[in-house]
Amino acid sequence: MRKIIKDKTIVNDDWQLVKLAEGEAAESLTVPTGKTIVPLQVWLAQKSTLASRTDIGVWLASDERAESLKEDIATLPLIAIDFPTFADGRGYSIAYQLRARLGFEGELRAIGDVLRDQLFYMARVGFNAFATREDRSIEDALKGLTDFSETYQTAWDQKTPLFRRVTRPSAQELA
């Protein structure tokens, strides 16, 4: 069984990811039973049928918009965002919008070309689960979440900048 990082722990991945084959229509895809992550196009095309299931997650491509799921945020247990290449940073913005602007509270998973170097920054924008590349060590990737001990700027995971969190001695104490 495939392993993922979820909430800073390596766990078994009990979700199956479904992709459309070349030329396959979203309306005609047969969605399997069990915990399944479907492409946004499939969700939108089959929403009337899939919305009644509690074991359906949706994945967004890096060129799709978080607002497409605005009406469904409260009912989806999992949203995944695909990183087609490690250099494509659009998924960071999508994640931040899902958390900060749309209020998504479920599992937010990074999928695709996900590498250790990215995990710390992905967590900063709201990801709490990571399906790392299978050709890399997941144990090593887990260490990427603790690469830095402190952050300077605000983000999803730290609302207060460092200069507001640090207590500095007064001028009298320095004298």
Image: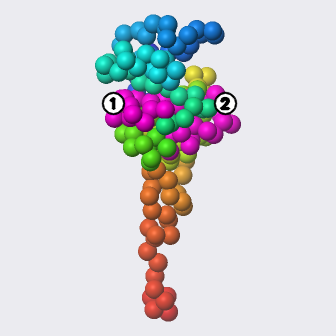
In what element is the residue under mark 2?
A: loop
Looking at the rendered structure, the kind of residue marked 1 is: Thr
Residue at 40% in and 29% down:
78
**Looking at the picture, how far across and down is residue 11, in whole percent?**
40, 27
Q: Are marks 1 and 2 in contact (CB under 8 Å)?
A: no
Secondary structure category for the residue under label 1: loop
Q: Residue furthest right?
A: 87
For residue 47, what is the image quadrant? top left
Q: Position of residue 77 (x, y in %)?
A: 36, 29
Q: Residue at x 43, y 16 (%)?
A: 46
Taking the magenta stretch, the answer to whether it contains residue 89 is yes
Is residue 139 shown to the viewer in this render? Answer: no
Residue 156 lies in the magenta-colored region:
no
- Earlier along the polypeptide chain: callout 1 or callout 2? 1
Task: Name which residue lies at 56% across and 43% down.
Answer: 93
Give the residue number, with chain letter if any, for mark 1: 75
| Residue 129 point in image, percent of width and height | 45, 33
Which amino acid, mark 2?
Thr
Which residue is disc 2 drawn over?
A: 85
Image quarter of the N terminus: top left
Relative vertical location of residue 73 with respect to residue 157 in this rendering, above or below: above
Task: Say the numbered circle drawn on residue 124.
Answer: none
Q: Residue at x 61, y 22 (%)?
A: 135
Q: State the image quarter where residue 19 is shown.
A: top right
The span picked out in magenta is: 68-96
